[in-house]
Image: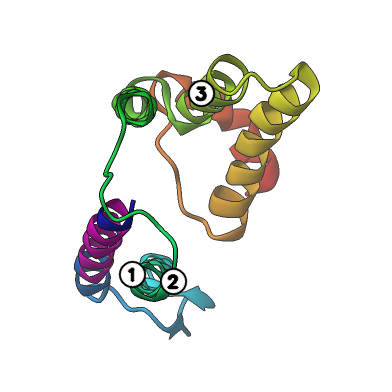
C-alpha cells in the first residue's frame, strides 16, 4: 500500500498545482467591486488544501512504520474504485443535460443506498438536503449559477422570489 499512497499522493499534488495555476487567471483575493471573493478564490484555496493534504499523505508514507510496501491494489479494491469512477463520469455527463441539482442527488442516492448500503433516513436526508444547500450556497450567497439543463424553467419562480 505504500506504493499506492505515494503514487496517488503525487498525482493529487500535481493536480492541485495545476488547478492552482489555472485559478490564478482569475482574482483569488477579496473583490471589492462585488463585495465577495474573486472568481479564482475557491478553486485556488481548495486546491491548496488538497495539496497540503496530499503532501501529508506522501510524508506519512515515508515515516509510517509497519506498512506493507509490496501491494498496490487487489482486484476487489480496484472494482470498487472503478465503480465509483464510472458513477462520477456518468454524473458529470448528466450535469449539462439534467442539471447539477438532479445529477448530484442521483449520484448521492446511488453511492449511499445502492453502493454503500446505508439506511433510508441517511440516504434521503443527504440526497434531499444537498441540492438545497448547493442552491443557497452557490446561487443565493455567492451568486454563482450552477448548470440546470432541462430543469432551468423550474427555477424561474425561485429567482423571482429571491432576486
Find the magenta span and give its range. Answer: 4-17
Q: How crowded is mark 2: few (under 14 residues within 10 Å), some or many (20 or more)?
A: few
Q: Does the magenta stretch include residue 39?
A: no
The secondary element bearing badge 1 is classed as helix
Gap in angstroms between the C-alphas marked 3 and 2 = 28 Å
Distance of label 1 from label 3 (alpha carbons) = 36 Å
Decide whether the magenta segment is chiefly helix, strand or loop: helix
Quadrant of the image occupied by residue 65: bottom left
Q: In which quarter of the image is residue 61?
A: bottom left
Residue 153's tag is none
Q: Is residue 13 magenta?
A: yes
Q: Nearer the viewer, residue 91 or 35?
A: 91
Question: Secondary structure under badge 2?
Answer: helix
Q: Name the residue under label 1.
A: 58
Which numbered circle lies on residue 102? 3
Q: Residue placed at 56% from the left, 30% from the top? A: 155
Amino acid at each position: 500500500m505504500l506504493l499506492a499512497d505515494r503514487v496517488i499522493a503525487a498525482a493529487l499534488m500535481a493536480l492541485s498545482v495545476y488547478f492552482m495555476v489555472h485559478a490564478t487567471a482569475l482574482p483569488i483575493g477579496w473583490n471589492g467591486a462585488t463585495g465577495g471573493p474573486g472568481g479564482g478564490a475557491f478553486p485556488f484555496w481548495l486546491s491548496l488544501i488538497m495539496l497540503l493534504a496530499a503532501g501529508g499523505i506522501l510524508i506519512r508514507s515515508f515515516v509510517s512504520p509497519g506498512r506493507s510496501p509490496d501491494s498496490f491494489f487487489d482486484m476487489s479494491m480496484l472494482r470498487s474504485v472503478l465503480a465509483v469512477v464510472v458513477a462520477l463520469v456518468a454524473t458529470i455527463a448528466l450535469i449539462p443535460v439534467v442539471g447539477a441539482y438532479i445529477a448530484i442527488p442521483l449520484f448521492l442516492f446511488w453511492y449511499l443506498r445502492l453502493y454503500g448500503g446505508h439506511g433510508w433516513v441517511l440516504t434521503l436526508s443527504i440526497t434531499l438536503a444537498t441540492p438545497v444547500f448547493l442552491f443557497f450556497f452557490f446561487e443565493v450567497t455567492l451568486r454563482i449559477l450552477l448548470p440546470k439543463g432541462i430543469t432551468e424553467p423550474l427555477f424561474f419562480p425561485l429567482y423571482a422570489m429571491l432576486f
